[in-house]
Image: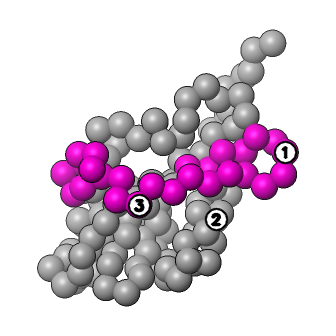
Amino acid sequence: MSRRPARPGERRARGGAAEDLAAAFLEARGFTILDRNHHSRRGEVDLVAERGEVLVFVEVRSSGDGDFVSPVETVGAAKRRRVAAAAIDWATRAGLLEARAIRFDVIAVVDRGEGEPELEWIPGAFDATGAPI
């Protein structure tokens, strides 16, 4: 049995729900969410968080039970560069680029259809150039 691709509205809803879970996950670990879905002309960052003096820019990915690739594996080099560019834009506009340490995390939300979705958190997944760490 083949699975039909998610429609754009379904993808947005699933993505928004995944971002809500990721934000709650971070807040439970002492982070403050400063912004969501920051867009610049060069990219987007899903969550902007802080804990202490560290700004954390988070790419949130989600998948369902029938997906064959881990959501983390879908964050390729081009996506990492776009997230980094949007993060630099956010930090510059906020006047925090030189004042704070910056980190790039990935949170994957996998909904297997049974119980609570699983979250996989990769702190420091890549650097400001988009290169994996």
Q: Nearer the viewer, mark 2 or mark 1?
A: 1
The residue under label 1 is 114
Quadrant of the drawing holding the N terminus: top right
Q: Relative to 6, is 97 on the left or the right?
A: left
Q: Is residue 103 above or below residue 80?
A: below
The residue under label 3 is 123
Amino acid type indicated by mark 2: Asp
How far is disc 3 from disc 1 in space, using C-alphas?
26 Å
Seen from the viewer's position, the closer of residues 92 and 50 is 50
Q: Relative to 65, is 103 on the left or the right?
A: left
- Asked which quadrant contains residue 94, the reply is bottom left
The residue under label 2 is 20
Q: Earlier in the sequence, mark 2 or mark 3?
A: 2
Amino acid type indicated by mark 1: Glu
Amino acid type indicated by mark 3: Pro
How far is disc 2 from disc 3 in space, using C-alphas?
18 Å
How far is disc 2 from disc 1 in space, using C-alphas?
18 Å
- Asked which quadrant contains residue 100, the reply is bottom left
User: Residue 120 placed where, x, y %?
Assistant: 56, 52
Estimate how packed mark 3 is, as few (under 14), some (14 to 19) or many (20 or more) residues with alpha carbons within 10 Å: some
- Asked which quadrant contains residue 38, the reply is bottom left
Q: Earlier in the sequence, mark 2 or mark 1?
A: 2
Give, as a single range, the part of the protein colored magenta: 108-133
Q: Earlier in the sequence, mark 3 or mark 1?
A: 1
SS for tag 2? helix
Q: Is residue 82 visible?
A: no
User: Residue 30 placed where, x, y %?
Assistant: 53, 82
User: Residue 108 placed where, x, y %?
Assistant: 55, 49
Q: Residue shown at 42%/82% (left/top)?
A: 51
In the image, farthest residue toward the top: 1
